[in-house]
Image: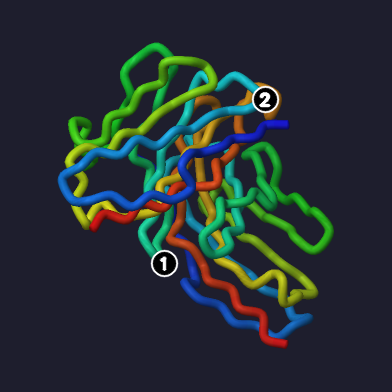
Amino acid sequence: GAVVSQHPSWVICKSGTSVKIECRSLDFQATTMFWYRQFPKQSLMLMATSNEGSKATYEQGVEKDKFLINHASLTLSTLTVTSAHPEDSSFYICSARSPAGGPYEQYFGPGTRLTVT
Amino acid sequence: GENVEQHPSTLSVQEGDSAVIKCTYSDSASNYFPWYKQELGKRPQLIIDIRSNVGEKKDQRIAVTLNKTAKHFSLHITETQPEDSAVYFCAASRGGAQKLVFGQGTRLTINP
């Protein structure tokens, strides 16, 4: 139980285009999902907290107009990188809380590697 | 906000020896401290966690200790094996829907 998937697993896009990444909780409902970005050999940095039916809460320094987050259902959150640039190339990982896992544990998706050329 | 510091950044030990990774946190309201193992290109995997009402927790070769007064917690891996080689991250959270704040990571290498 408590499986989180992401799609796509990797994507290459051209500079200036937009790309959408999906995060799904497969066997549970997630009222809260989190989006992280991880550059090579670095830690996971939280970008935003996504709450179902409301606006996402962005971390300081993350451009909310560039990284659009939508959490329209209890099993799906999407991250859209708009007007992508090479510096946006990174590993994007989502996580979700499962009620079955108690109030603490987060379950991570497999990640999406974005390369902007 | 919360700040988590993790040391060392790299650690190399001989197979069979023990490895210790240490983290400190700044937010006294944090009450959940998980440890993750991440292999290259993969998702972080929870290996052990501890809550603030417990001082120590053990799961086979892995143990975590927590000192709330000093605001630090440590991961102990005994009888290390080559498959323990990976990057390990500590994290802290206030629990509930609160976010996880990660340490910088430790690249652990087990030498045969």
Disc tally is: 2
Q: Nearer the viewer, residue A21 or A30?
A: A21
Q: Residue at x 68, y 52 (%)?
A: B47
Residue with the mark numbered 2: A27
The CA span between labels 2 and 1 is 31 Å
Three-letter code, disc 1 = Lys
The percent position of residue A71, horizontal first and vertical second, equals 41, 20
Three-letter code, disc 2 = Asp
Q: Residue at x 43, y 50 (%)?
A: A10
Eye-nearest disc, 2 or 1: 2
The percent position of residue A103, horizontal first and vertical second, equals 61, 26
Chain letter for the residue marked with disc 1 in the picture: A
Q: Nearer the viewer, residue B31 or B13?
A: B13
**Label 2 packing within 10 angstroms: few (<14), some (14-19), many (20+):** few
The percent position of residue B20, horizontal first and vertical second, equals 63, 70
**Where B9 falls versus B59 (above or below)?**
below
Q: Residue at x 73, y 51 (%)?
A: B56
**Where B109 falls versus A67 (above or below)?**
below
The percent position of residue A23, horizontal first and vertical second, equals 48, 33
Q: Secondary structure at mark 2?
A: loop
Residue with the mark numbered 1: A41
